[in-house]
Amino acid sequence: MVTTIVSTVELPERAREMLKGYGVDLYELPRLSRDEQLNALSKAEVLLCWCGREFDLAGNIGLMRRLKVIQTFSAGVDHLPFSAIPSNIEIYSNAGAYSIPVAEHAWAMILTLAKGLHRPVLNAREYLGNELTSPRKVFEATLLVLGTGGIGREIARIGKEGFRTYNIGINRSGRLAEYFDEVHPTSRLLEVLPRADIVAIALPLNKYTMGLIGERELRALKRGAIVVNVGRGDVVREEDLYRVLKERQDIRFGTDVWWVHDGHEEIPPRTPLTTLPNFLGTPHIAGGAQRDIAEYAIMRAVENVIRYIRGETPVNRVNRDDYI
C-alpha cells in the first residue's frame, strides 16, 4: 500500500528523490491550491511539519483522519497541541538535528561572558578591575550541563576536548552519558549547582522542566558562576532570574531562548533583563537560520520517516505523558 506523506514546507530536491524512491505519494502544501491542500490532508498518513509556525495543526487535525505519524522538523515539541492530537497518532521529534550549531552557540556565549566581552569596555584598568567584565578562566573549569541529550552531550564534548572541563550532567534518571564524568538525577540538582563554574541549560520544555530553575537554584550558584540557556526560556523562572541577577552581579547569564506569553516567545522579555549589565541575550538563533543547517534538519526528519516506511522503528518517539 502506498504511503501518503504531507509536508507543510517545500522539501529539498534530494529529500523528494529519497522519498519517491520508496514509491510514496508526496504532497508539499506550499505548492498546492487550498482545494488541493484539503485533498492532500484528507489522505495523509504521515505529516512532516514545524507545527506552530507555518501550519495550524490543531485547526487541521480533524481533516487528517488517516493520519498515523507526525514527524517534526524541530527538535523541541512543546509547541504541539497535544490535547488535540488523537492518542493513536505516533509523534516523533527531530532531537539531535541541531546539536552542533546550538552547542557552538552555547560555547560562544560562555566564552563571551567568561572574558567579559558582553560589555564594551576599552579602558584596560576598568575592564580588568570591574566584576562585570574581569576575565574568568574556562580551562579545567567544572561544567554542569542540564540535559544530557544531543545538545547537552555536544556541549560537554566541546568542553572536555577543548578546555579539559570536568563535566557533570543532570538528567531525570541519573544515567551516565558520553563525555560526562558524573551524572546525577534532577532531584540532586540543588546540591550539585554550587560546584559548577559554568552551567549550561540544554533541557526540553515539558511538565517536568517548566520552572525548574527558580530563585532557590539561582542563589545556590557559586560566586562568579556563568550560566547559559539554549534549551527553553521557561525552564528558568523569568522574574526570579531578574531579581537574582539584579542583586548578584557576580553571576553572568546568557540566553538564546525566551519566555512564552500569550502563546508566543517574547523578545525582549517582559522583565527588564536586557538592561542588566550581567545579562547577554541573542534572539533564538542558536539552531541557525542558515540554509545548510535547515536542510540538514529536514533531511534528518525525512530519514526518520523512511524508517517508518521500511517498517523499522523510528527514533525520537515522543512520550506525550511528558507534556499532558
Image: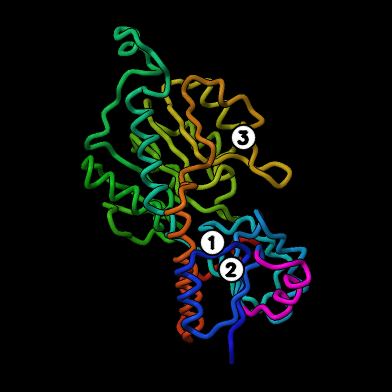
Label 3 to label 1: alpha-carbon separation: 23 Å
Write the start and end of the magenta stretch as one range.
31-45
Label 2 to label 1: alpha-carbon separation: 7 Å
Label 2 crowding class (10 Å Cα cut-off): few <14, some 14-19, many 20+?
many
Indicate which disc residue 25 carries: none
Q: Of label 3 and label 1, which has the lower sequence position?
A: 1
Residue lying at 25% horizontally and 44% vertically, measured from the top left: 166
Q: Which of 92 and 66 is in front in this view?
A: 66
Q: In which quarter of the image is residue 265?
A: top right
Give x and y (percent) for residue 242: 57, 27
Label 1 crowding class (10 Å Cα cut-off): few <14, some 14-19, many 20+?
many
Q: Mark 1 points at which residue?
A: 73
Is mark 2 in CB contact (under 8 Å) with mark 1? Answer: yes
Q: Mark 3 points at which residue?
A: 267
Which amino acid does the dot numbered 3 rest on? Ile
Which amino acid does the dot numbered 1 rest on? Phe
Is mark 2 in CB contact (under 8 Å) with mark 3? Answer: no
Residue lying at 36% horizontally and 44% vertically, measured from the top left: 104
Relative placement, left or right, of 318 versus 192 is right
Which amino acid does the dot numbered 2 rest on? Leu
